[in-house]
Image (cartoon, rainbow, N blue to C red):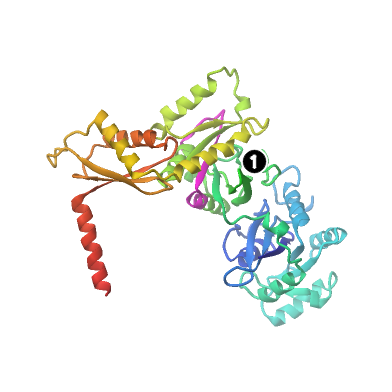
Amino acid sequence: MIHGVVAIVGRPNVGKSTLFNRLTRNNTAIVDDQPGVTRDRIYGIAPLDRDASESFVVIDTGGYESDATCFQPFSENLVWQQTQQAIAEADVILFVMDGSSGLHYLDEALINYLREKSCTIVFAINKVDGREQAEQKLWDFLKIAEQDALLPISAAYRRGLVPLIERVTELLPHSANRAAGLVSPAGTRVAFIGRPNVGKSSLLNRLVGHERSLVSQIAGTTRDSIETPLVYNQHPYVLVDTAGMRRKTKVKETIEVQSVVRSLRTIEESQVVVVVLDALEGLKDQDARLVNLAIERGKPVLLVVNKWDLVPNKTTNTAKDYAHNLQKGVLQDRSFIPVHFISCLSNQRVHQVMAKVEALYRQSNKKVPTSQINTALAKIVAQHGPQLIKSFTKRPKFYYISQVEVAPPTLVVMCNVSKGIQVSYVRYLVNGLRRELGFEQVPIRLIFRSKEEVNARREQHQETELAGQ
């Protein structure tokens, strides 16, 4: 059961993201000594027991800044807008301060704001090591709260977290209604990836209907992978906005390296990958690498061409020609990938994105009867048979075929010769099976196995079982 929502707030570099990672027991939030790393609000589940049957929602936020002390490059305080949203959603505010530097004027300003909003506040004094140090450092903070209300902790070394969690849970409303809608650990995961500043965050905001991800004209605005639950056609999804990925040679800062690592992990964990392109720039080498990365991992891909409203002199066939040039040009063997044109600015065709994501997910998870697959294979081979394999002096014979897995659809062909089949013929079989079986827009895997290989596998398995007895 989820008992409520807790927002972690404080000025920059006091250890909010480290505490968030400790409470959620993972490394979702990027942590760095550089102030101002966190920008978007990040949601997680903080378990209260081993099996996570009892928990609360925790939100990591960006640091509270003033005009005089600002670490963000934006013309307006977009990070503070994200923090205000988190505060509005929270039942309890976990206010984190830096015990090593004492009470700061930004701490006092933020506390006054929270008290004006009548927030329920838990005070955590971070970076405090040991009881003696706690007694000494808490004196600086008696100006804002009684001593028994100040909880000394060390998030980095996991000290003081148990009494902190106990204090928080005492104040939570023990109501899962609102909290459950903020996070969705279960659901089809959809990754939005691409180069910086192509409109990934804008697209996600349009789909969910509110400003979930921070958007600006500055490339590299998104750093963490931002998860957002969405229900479409009564099916739960988790949309994941990721940091823009540049070529490896251009990635030098530690923070960007961590962002890229999280984006790559998001591809691995997702069921559908949406690659967002800039219509004016087209599909660059980096985009092609991201597409290949997803396809090699068996993920269905949707190419979304954003900023279509900026393309000049469009005619009836402009989009069709654009898609044809992508599929038959740079993508080459990935021509089965669907292409969709949108404009986040004018909300043009954005509403169709989830329908296409749903179709790709269903294709990738489709299970076809064995009889239907064998009929399709026989038809394809009858139209164009395989050539003689000179090294074996044999022509491949395909005995039968069956589907053994979904996501991606994996087909195993039993044959007399499993090696040496021409690459072009394998491609012909894959394209034919994709067309005949309804896998037109998703990657499929075709595995050839001979009777000798099957028998060898069976004998090896039996030997392993006997050795274990």
Residue located 20% across and 57% down the image: 456
Residue located 39% across and 43% down the image: 368
Q: Is residue 275 visible?
A: no
13 vs 313: above or below: below
305 vs 262: above or below: above
Q: Quadrant of residue 381?
A: top left
Classify residue 281 as left or right of residue 3: left
403 vs 308, nearest the viewer: 403
Residue located 66% across and 72% down the image: 154
Classify residue 297 as left or right of residue 244: left
Q: Does the magenta stretch include residue 85?
A: no
Amino acid marked by disc 1: Leu
Q: Position of residue 87 (x, y in %)?
A: 77, 56
Q: Can residue 116 be seen in this view?
A: yes
Q: Where is residue 398 in the image (x, y as percent from the top left)?
A: 23, 41
111 vs 256: above or below: below
Residue placed farthest to the right in the image?
116
- The C terminus: image quadrant: bottom left
Q: Is mark 1 on a helix, strand or loop?
A: helix
- The N terminus: image quadrant: bottom right
Q: Where is residue 462 in the image (x, y as percent from the top left)?
A: 23, 65
Which span is picked out in magenta? 264-285
Q: Mark 1 points at which residue?
A: 207
Count residues near mark 1 (Cα–Cα under 10 Å), then give few for <14, some for 14-19, many for 20+: some
428 vs 114, nearest the viewer: 428
Q: In which quarter of the image is residue 114?
A: bottom right
Q: How many marks?
A: 1
Q: Does the magenta stretch include residue 265?
A: yes
Q: Where is residue 203 in the image (x, y as percent from the top left)?
A: 63, 39
158 vs 38: above or below: below
Q: In which quarter of the image is residue 358?
A: top right
